[in-house]
Amino acid sequence: MLKIEGLTASVDGKAILKGIDLVVPDGEVHAIMGPNGSGKSTLSYVLAGRDGYEVTGGSAAFDGADLLAMEPEARAAAGLFLAFQYPVELPGVNNANFLRTALNAQRRARGEAELDAVQFLKLSRAEAKRLSMPDDMLKRNVNVGFSGGEKKRNEVLQMAILRPKLAILDETDSGLDIDALKIVADGVNALRGPATSALVITHYQRLLDYIVPDRVHVLAGGRIIRSGGPELALELEASGYASVVAEAA
Amino acid sequence: MTALPRPRALQPAWSQDAAAAFVARYEGLRGRLPGDAAAREAGAAAFAARGLPGVRDEAWHFTSLRALAETRFAEPLTPVADCAAMLARLPQTDAPRLVFVDGRFRDDLSVVPQSVSVRVGGPAYATLANPDREAMVALNTMLAGDGAAIDVAAGVDGGTLLLVSLGTGTADRPVAFHPRHSVHLADGASLTLLDVVMGEGAYWHNAVLELAIGEGATLVHLRLQDESHAAFHVSTVYADVAARGTYDSFALTLGGKWARMEVHASLSGPKAVAHLNAAQLLGGSQHADFTTVITHAAPHCASRQTVKNVLTGRSRGVFQGKIEVARDAQKTDGYQMNQALLLSPDAEIDSKPELEIFADDVKCSHGATVGELDGEQLFYLRSRGVPQAEARSMLVRAFLAEALDPIAHDAGRAMLEAAVSAWWERQAP
């Protein structure tokens, strides 16, 4: 699904990623954990193609294609989805219209038929219901006036409707209470399957109680310093990042 | 007949020459023009004394008349464009319509309304215009050849009426026309006026509209300025709103190479309301100026203004918004917001809000913002699969939504939204 080799990247001339190697096979969920400032969000932005994040070396292949050569919209159409740590407000853009435009743009790019208004309404209402979101969230402007939890749930709703092959969740658990956390986790778990994968970026182990990863990687100082099974998350929770970072140094 | 005074010598030669040419045209036509000769003569005297506005006129500080003054305009003869093709671009509605071509009423293209009284065949001079203060209005008063006097009787709902101006001219023979319209809503009457101006080729459209809105009456005035890209457009609107009356207007400017809309709205009876909303969408080297003066002359009146500018290329937008609150106009509620979205580094906006408040118990606020498209918002949309051009289009529409969405008249809003879409498609690289 995703194969990253020797990836280095800088922001404003400052090296943040210093050689990432990571393989996420089809159907697996991998967690990336690490202290603040370790490069977790930078990795997610580089993979999604945000301006200002300059790739200085290495490669990232998505289903064999050169991910880093693609425009952000082409990455999305190819099946990559980034759930933002800080979802962006779009005043004047209706949430349902936004979702339908995005879904149809992706379908168009893939040569699939677009959904008409009725088909889309049915789909979006069903997904919103499954995520315990009130219907009126679809009618409001994108993320405008949403609480922190509502914004995160709206990210998961987008993911549910867009059905990506690879979902990257950038600290989607931050600021969520336990009920919202479960809803988010259910949304991710519902997508799991032999042909879909996820990269769950988190600071805390808590989310991984609900989204059990196949592999856990520790990112520190722009490098993956340790990888292991789900038990690694528990170890980090018990002993903190400092000991793992010290051990690797 | 007395000779008219020469234009004042303060203006530069190009301005004086242009003014003299207009005065000479009037002297040639004098006595053969229709309508109230005394009103016309007073306008001519005012124009001859003042000439064209200059940059020293504060109201014209940001908008130079030089290109207009250096164009020699002829009298309209036979229309030189396909009027039927232009009319096909009008919104599909059953509403009656009054069509003027090069400033002349065209019976053959019009559908006269039932519930509204209309008189055409000469300028519809009313009592609200101020030719002594506004030079373009003086010029219009001097040379106006035709116009519609629209009357809605007390308590009558006049429905929807289209007022259409088509301009036609050629580069080697640009024409000028000065239509003069009036609308009178008696007490409790209502009307939605869809005011569309468009055209082909080179011309100058210099219109004056006087709008008298009676007690408890409501005029919805939805304006689309979609003049030819080679046209000059000047329109001056005077609206007087009596007690509990409403003037609810939205003006969309996207046409013309050089345009100025000026609106003087007076809230003259208690609890009168005025909405002077607008959007200017400009590209290339277009220049457009939206200048408004709202006078709160009575207590408990409210005025609202949201003016949006979307500027690309080397275009320049101007907004001047003045709110005057008279000493007696206590409990005035005034709000004004001007926002500009600059889509190119060479576009420019000049914004001048002005508050003049003589009452002590008022609520007046104003604000202005200038910005580019938000990079984070663009990336968010693209990360969801929306291509860059479509993402930009969505954000521009979102910017305009605050001004367009509140328009309650469905056909009117649809007309304006379609014009916005067409404009955006023309901007696409």
Image: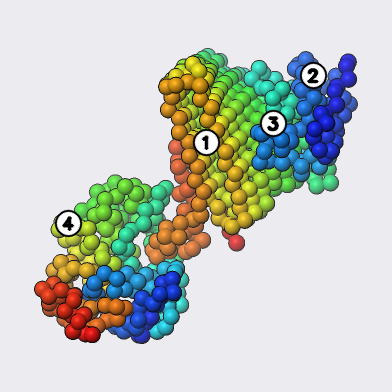
Picture quadrant of residue A218:
bottom left
Label 1 vs label 3, nearer the camera: 1
CB within 8 Å, label 1 to label 2: no
CB within 8 Å, label 3 to label 4: no
Residue placed under numbered mark 2 in the picture: B41
Residue lying farthest left?
A238
Residue placed under numbered mark 3 in the picture: B207
Tell me the kind of residue under disc 2: Glu
Do the residues marked 1 and 2 share a common chain? Answer: yes
Q: Residue A83's spot in the image, x, y percent? A: 31, 64
Q: Can residue B379 be seen in this view?
A: yes
First along the sequence among labels 1 and 3: 3
Tell me the kind of residue under disc 3: Ala
Name the quadrant of the C terminus of chain A: bottom left
- Determine the CA span between mark 1 and mark 2: 34 Å
CB within 8 Å, label 1 to label 4: no
Q: How is the image coloured?
A: rainbow
Neighbours of disc 2 within 10 Å: few (<14), some (14-19), many (20+): some
Tell me the kind of residue under disc 4: Asp
Q: Which chain carries label 2?
A: B
Picture quadrant of residue A222:
bottom left
Residue placed under numbered mark 1 in the picture: B277
Residue at image position (38%, 73%) is A46
Residue A177's tag is: 4
Q: Is mark 4 on a helix, strand or loop?
A: loop
Residue at image position (66%, 22%) is B129
First along the sequence among labels 3 and 2: 2
Q: Which of the two residues, A187 or B308, is positioned nearer the viewer here?
A: B308
Neighbours of disc 4 within 10 Å: few (<14), some (14-19), many (20+): few
Do the residues marked 1 and 4 share a common chain? Answer: no
Picture quadrant of residue B18:
top right
